[in-house]
Amino acid sequence: MFDAHIVRKDFPILNRLIEGKKNIYMDTAASAQKPYVLLKRLEKAYLEEYANVHRGSYWLSEIATENYEKARHVAAKFINSESPDSIIFTRSATEGINLVAATYGLANLHEGDEILLSRAEHHANLVTWQQTALKTGAKIVYFDLDDCGNFVWDNFISTLSSRTKIVAVTAMSNVLGTIFPVERICKEAHNIGAKVLIDACQFAVHKKIDVQKFDCDFLAFSGHKVYGPTGIGVLYGKYDLLKELPPYQYGGDMIEHVSYEKTTFALPPARFEAGTPAIVQAIGLSASLEYIMQFDFDDIEKYEAELIDYTTKHLLDIQGLKILGTAKEKGGVFSFAIDGIHPQDLAFILAKEGVAIRTGHFCAQPLVNILGYSSLARASLGIYTTKEDIDDFIVALQKAKNFFTNEM
Amino acid sequence: MNIEDLIDDFSFLDNWEDKYKYLIELGNQLPHFVDSQKIEQWKISGCQSQVWIIPHFSSSLLSFQGDSDAIIVRGIIAVVLEIFNDKSAQEILDIDVEEIFDRMGLREHITPNRRSGMLAMVDKIKFYARQSLGEKNEYSRVSGQEDL
C-alpha cells in the first residue's frame, strides 16, 4: 500500500527546517523535490561513469552512452511508448513544444488553418502557438471550460473543424487541476485529420501516461516536475511523423554525413538532439522515473483522491476562501483566493510558517485574468504530501488570515 | 519622520510579526491611487503584486507616489518612498537601499522574490533620477519575473 509518510523520508530536503519550522512544501506543481536515489545517481554518473556520448570508443564513453540510451528506454516505459526511438530528450517541456511548433507547425500550417487550444493553456503551450500563428498566417481558436473548470465536450467539438490542423492541449491544467479526456480528444481530432500535441507537465506527476492508449501524435513533459533534474524534458512523437520532420537545430550528433557542400541528417531521435545532450540529467531523470514506477499508479491516484477531498474540505472551512477549479475530474492543485487578502500578503505570512505556496498567475496569465483575478494563491500536492502537511498548511493559512483580519 | 527614525523603529521590533504589523501600519497611511493613476505607464514589472510608482519632478528635487494591491507591499513602498522622497537625483543614485533595509532588520524578512520586487521599484526610481539628470540610453534593470 502506498504510504506518503515513508515516501517523504526519501526526499532529504523535506526534513530540513524552514525558518525554524517544519518544511511544508506545497509547490510541487511548479517544481517537485528530489528523491535521494536521484542524487546518488547523479553522483555516480559524474564520479564513475562520465564522458561524452556517441563519440569515443573507450570505456567511459561507452558506459555513458549506454546509460544515456538506457534512460531513453526508461522514459519510453514511463509513458508506454511503442519504441524508445520515439523519445527525444529536450531541455524542458517548453522546448519540446517549441520543437513541434518549429518543425511540424512551420512545415504544415498555412493561412486559413486553425490551431485549437483550450483557454487553460499555460504560456509554454500558448505563446509558442501564438508566435507560430503569426509566422504561418494560421489562426488560434480557443475552447472554453465551464465556470467550475470542467472540460465541456460540446465546447470542444463545436470549435473543432475541418480547418483545425493542430490541437494542442494540456492533459491537466496547472491552475484549475482539470483533467482533460485526452483519449477522446485524440480520437475526435484524428477523425477530421488534425494532429494532437499533449502537454503532460502536470498530468505526469499525478496520473499514468499511456501514449499508445491516448493515441496522441506528440506529448511533452518536463523532468523537474516528475522528481527529476532541471534542464531535461521529454518529447514523444509518433515515429512515422518524426521521420518526416526537418531538424530543429543543427550541429553535431544529428548528422548522417557531412561534406563542405552538404549534410544529410540522422534518423530520429538523433536528428532532434543536436550537440552534446544533457547526458547526466537524462540519466538522473531515468533514476527518478524508476523511483516513481516502483509504485503502482493506481495506488498513488487513490491516495491522492483522498488527499484532494481532505484538502478541499479543510480549505472550504476557512471563511471567505474560494477555490478556483472544482472540476469533477481534477488532480492535486488548488488555486484559491481569500476575500480581502492579496495572495502575496498571504504568502508572506505562510513563508514565515515554513509553508511554500505559489502566488501570481502561474504562467497562465490569460486564464487567471478571465477568472477575474490578477493574482491567485496555489497549493499543490506531490507523492510526499501527507495529511499532516495539509493540517499544518491549514493552520498556517488560518493564522495568516487572522493576522490580516486583525490588521485591517 | 526621517529615515533614521524609521531605522530605529524597525530595529527596535525584534520579531517578524511586529515588523510586518508596523509595515502594514505605514502602508495604511499611504493614500490609495484612483483608477486613472493605476495605468500601465506607472506599473512596475517584476513584482508579484501590482505596484505603481508615479514620479514628480519639481525644481531640483524628486518625489514619488506609490500604491499596490497587497498591503505588506504598500508598507514596503511607504519605506521606499520615505528613503527616496524629496531628494536630488544625485542623492537618489547614491543611496544604498539594501544597506538601509539591512539596518532595519527587514532584509532577512523579505524573501529574494519579494526583494527583487522591492529592487524593481528602486530601479525604477533610480531610472527616473537618471532621466532627470538627462542621461540618455539608460535602461531599467527591471527584470520580468516569471511565474511558472
Image: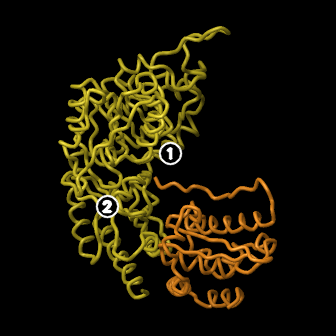
User: Residue A274 vs residue A141: left or right?
Assistant: right
In the rendered picture, chain B carries what hue?
orange
Above or below residue A118? Residue A243 is: above
The residue sitting at 60% across, 74% down in the picture is B108
Subunit of label 2? A
Subunit of label 1? A
Whichever of callouts 2 and 1 sits on the residue coming sooner in the sequence is 1
User: Residue B123 vs residue A321: left or right?
Assistant: right
User: Residue A229 vs residue A158: left or right?
Assistant: right
Tags 2 and 1 touching, CB below 8 Å: no
Query: Is label 2 on the same chain as label 1?
Result: yes
Mark 2 surroundings within 10 Å by alpha-carbon count, few (fewer than 14), some (14 through 19), many (20 or more)? many
Above or below residue A25? Residue A354 is: below
Mark 1 surroundings within 10 Å by alpha-carbon count, few (fewer than 14), some (14 through 19), many (20 or more)? some
The image position of residue A367, as x and y in percent, is 36, 54
Amino acid type assigned to the residue bearing label 2 in the image: Phe
The image position of residue A404, as x and y in percent, is 41, 82
- Among the chains pictured, the one given yellow colouring is A
Can residue A34 be seen by looking at this rendering?
yes
The foreground one among A203 and B145 is B145
The foreground one among B134 and A284 is B134
In the rendered view of the protein, which quadrant contains the C terminus of chain A?
A: bottom left
The image position of residue A31, as x and y in percent, is 44, 52
Badge 1 element: loop
Give the image quarter of residue A5: bottom left
Q: Provide the residue designation for mark 2.
A: A334
The residue sitting at 24% across, 75% down in the picture is A317
Q: CA distance from mark 2 to mark 1?
A: 24 Å
Number of numbered discs on residues: 2
Q: Provide the residue designation for mark 1.
A: A230
The image position of residue B102, as x and y in percent, is 67, 77
The residue sitting at 58% across, 10% down in the picture is A257
